[in-house]
């Protein structure tokens, strides 16, 4: 196996991150339990949009003391159409990456957002080009969420030129489960220089430039940064993808694959690589261990050194795809350059294990998947093409991610076993994409710069 | 650096088979006699091909893809002395490309020196989209890439993967047509099937 190091001319020292400048959402984990809201706004008049930003910016939290700071905060992110609507100069607009400029809907081919996930099936206002600004409130209580939201509302209400297009609440389900009944949000990349030691099993910290603009990335050089410097530096990109969970289809599939609750839970664990409690199959191969699932210092502390063929954790399961750790891949890949900071959130009705009908598929519930990276667009396209909607990279042919992949007729999932593998059929698209957009999450100084634009 | 747009973005033809045949007849009205005769004799087979659904896609920003396999063809201008350096290096390597093995997406590569050693025609078949793994190359095999690409004008170095990808795309000429015998067989899948085939033969040997 050919291996090379990056060689000379690369900074070995972790840069001290400018935490006062970086928005809190980039580094701060959501509280548990959590309560949140996304407000989607359209800027109808540049002057009004800038006035709104000027008023909002003092209320936007930075990452200073992110590990023990407040547990209620506001963040703001702006789409390309939003930057245009705010009157950002043309040469600056052109300095943003192409995938960001054209927006998520226009990149459907590269994102493999086809069939049921095609942008023509998206909910309004997704894909209309009218989503300009997203404001997010995160909190650990309903009451504090309401107060944070009221602060945001004061800044956009009462003057014309900024319209609210949508308000979406999200929040913890009982037991901190997602809409398919799994504990999620485990396993985030650790950011180098952010000041906190990651828990066991999170891998070495990844160069800050992968997640925040203006710092060296894994390859050694900073990524191209939007100009001018004050606009790009300490900013990052945020992708939003809203999924509808087809809980009825998922349960029907489990029932077709297992005749007892025990068998069904085994299949459910194999699809993800963790039991519903969050306990990883590597550490709890035979039965669930809820105490392990709940322990953040143990529930991610494993690798696949003793499981190269996937007999514990199937090669094609969700967590092995999204973070292959030390799995030998068929293609030359550097896992550390395909990571995302995830700020996903669950919305709608809780998971219901007894929901089996097609009507249950349409009960509003699912995930608002927020992902953060200095190259969020390229990373999501890579993941959608290679790690989610294909299986070649990890040796499972045409199989796709059983949880977030878009399945085609006749899809199956292979569970390696001795003496012979078991192949379960009838996989459907269990999470259907209902919309998405890319945003730029500017630094605090960049927000001020945007608010003070002329013209 | 400006990049070319893929010719694969040409408008999709929506002609009927009869219209297509009419078009071919017009094209061959002034063709050499051999061609005219071939058209008349070969019409039944040609008809089948013209009636088949389109099978080409783009390979991302540039190039063609059929199924999972994409084509890349670049004409790269040598720096002074670059042609000799690369030719001698390739001869010493004698057909061994460990980096290409490691990459895992590469089906084949050909290195053709053209224009009196002014340019290299490099052509390859690979799996997936153009931009997908450029940064992985930069992280994992920058030296293997720089060693041969340093011989060309304007190459920015693999440690700047975005610029390197733009540079390659700027020299790429998208194929007008692209045929792949097994369009859904990727390089790793081919190797996997080789192993499976061997195991099956061994099993049959034991039984038989």
Image (cartoon, rainbow, N blue to C red):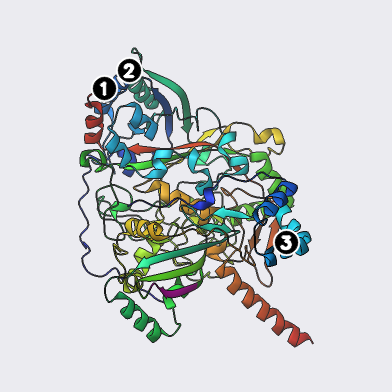
Number of marks in the image? 3
- x and y percentages locating residue A404 in the rendered image: 56, 47
Mark number displayed over residue A154:
2
Q: Residues within 10 Å of mark 1 (few under 14, many from 20)?
A: some
Q: Which mark's residue is nearer the viewer, 2 or 1?
A: 1
Q: Quadrant of residue B161?
A: bottom left
Q: Residues within 10 Å of mark 3 (few under 14, many from 20)?
A: some
> Disc 2, disc 1: CB below 8 Å?
yes
Mark number displayed over residue B39:
3
In this view of the protein, which residue sits in the foreground, A103 or A437? A103
Could you tell me how far apart the alpha carbons at marks 1 and 3 are, in whole angstroms?
Answer: 73 Å
Identify the residue at image location x=40%, y=24%.
A42
Provide the chain ID for the residue under circle 1.
A
- x and y percentages locating residue A442 in the rendered image: 29, 37
Task: Tell me: residue B100, above or below residue A18.
Answer: below
Task: Tell me: residue A152, above or below residue B188.
Answer: above
Q: Which mark's residue is nearer the viewer, 2 or 3?
A: 3
Q: Quadrant of residue B142?
A: bottom left
Provide the chain ID for the residue under circle 2.
A
Identify the residue at image location x=51%, y=47%.
A111
The residue segment tinted magenta is B109-115
Residue that carries the numbered disc 1 in the rendered image: A55
């Amino acid at each position: 196996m050919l291996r090379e190091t990056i060689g000379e001319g690369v900074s070995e020292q972790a840069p001290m991150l400018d935490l006062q400048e970086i928005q809190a959402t980039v580094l701060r984990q959501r509280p548990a339990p959590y309560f949140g809201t996304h407000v989607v706004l359209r800027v109808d008049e540049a002057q009004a949009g800038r006035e709104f930003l000027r008023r909002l910016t003092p209320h936007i939290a930075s990452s200073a003391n992110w590990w023990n700071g407040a547990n209620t905060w506001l963040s703001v992110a702006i789409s390309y159409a939003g930057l245009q609507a705010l009157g950002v100069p043309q040469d600056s607009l052109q300095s943003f990456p192409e995938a960001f400029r054209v927006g998520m809907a226009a990149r459907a081919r590269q994102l493999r957002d086809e069939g049921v996930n095609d942008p023509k099936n998206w909910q309004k206002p997704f894909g209309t080009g009218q989503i300009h600004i997203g404001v997010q409130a995160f909190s650990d209580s309903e009451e504090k969420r309401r107060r944070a939201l009221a602060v945001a509302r004061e800044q956009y209400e009462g003057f014309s030129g900024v319209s609210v297009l949508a308000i979406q609440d999200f929040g913890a389900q009982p037991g901190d489960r997602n809409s398919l009944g799994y504990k999620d949000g485990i396993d985030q990349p650790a950011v180098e220089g952010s000041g906190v030691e990651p828990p066991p099993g999170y891998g070495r910290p990844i160069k800050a430039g992968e997640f925040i603009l203006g710092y060296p990335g894994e390859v050694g050089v900073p990524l191209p940064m939007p100009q001018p410097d004050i606009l790009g530096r300490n900013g990052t990109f945020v992708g939003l993808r809203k999924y509808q969970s087809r809980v009825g289809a998922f349960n029907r599939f489990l029932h077709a694959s297992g005749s007892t609750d025990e068998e069904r839970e085994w299949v459910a664990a194999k699809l993800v690589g963790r039991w519903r409690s969050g306990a990883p199959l590597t550490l709890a191969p035979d039965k669930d261990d809820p105490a392990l699932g709940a322990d953040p210092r143990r529930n991610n502390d494993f690798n696949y050194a003793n499981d190269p063929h996937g007999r514990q954790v199937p090669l094609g399961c969700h967590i092995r795809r999204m973070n292959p750790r030390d799995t030998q891949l068929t293609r030359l890949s550097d896992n550390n350059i395909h990571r995302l900071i995830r700020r996903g959130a669950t919305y709608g009705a809780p998971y219901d294990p007894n929901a089996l009908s097609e009507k249950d598929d349409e009960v509003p519930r699912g995930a608002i998947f927020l992902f953060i990276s200095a190259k969020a667009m390229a990373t999501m396209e890579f993941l959608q093409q290679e790690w989610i909607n294909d299986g070649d990279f990890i040796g499972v042919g045409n199989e796709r991610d059983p949880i977030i992949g878009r399945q085609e007729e006749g899809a199956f999932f292979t569970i390696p076993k001795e003496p012979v593998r078991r192949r379960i059929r009838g996989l459907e698209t269990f999470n259907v994409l209902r919309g998405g957009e890319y945003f730029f999450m500017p630094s605090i100084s960049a927000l001020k710069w945007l608010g003070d634009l002329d013209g | 650096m400006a990049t070319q747009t893929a010719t694969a973005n040409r408008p999709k033809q929506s002609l009927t088979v009869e219209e297509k045949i009419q078009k071919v007849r017009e094209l061959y009205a002034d063709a050499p006699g051999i061609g005219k005769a071939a058209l008349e004799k070969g019409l039944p087979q040609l008809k089948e091909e013209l009636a088949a659904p389109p099978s080409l896609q783009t390979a991302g920003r540039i190039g063609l893809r059929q199924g999972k396999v994409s084509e890349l063809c670049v004409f790269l201008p040598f720096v002074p002395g670059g042609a000799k350096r690369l030719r001698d290096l390739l001869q010493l390597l004698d057909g061994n490309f460990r980096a290409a093995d490691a990459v895992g997406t590469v089906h084949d590569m050909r290195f053709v020196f053209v224009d009196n050693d002014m340019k290299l025609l490099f052509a390859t078949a690979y799996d997936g989209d153009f931009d997908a793994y450029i940064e992985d190359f930069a992280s994992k095999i920058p030296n293997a890439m720089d060693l041969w690409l340093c011989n060309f004008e304007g190459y920015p170095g693999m440690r700047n993967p975005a610029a390197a990808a733009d540079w390659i795309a700027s020299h790429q000429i998208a194929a007008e047509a692209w045929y792949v015998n097994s369009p859904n067989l990727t390089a790793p899948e081919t190797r996997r099937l080789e192993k499976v085939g061997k195991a099956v033969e061994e099993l049959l040997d034991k039984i038989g």
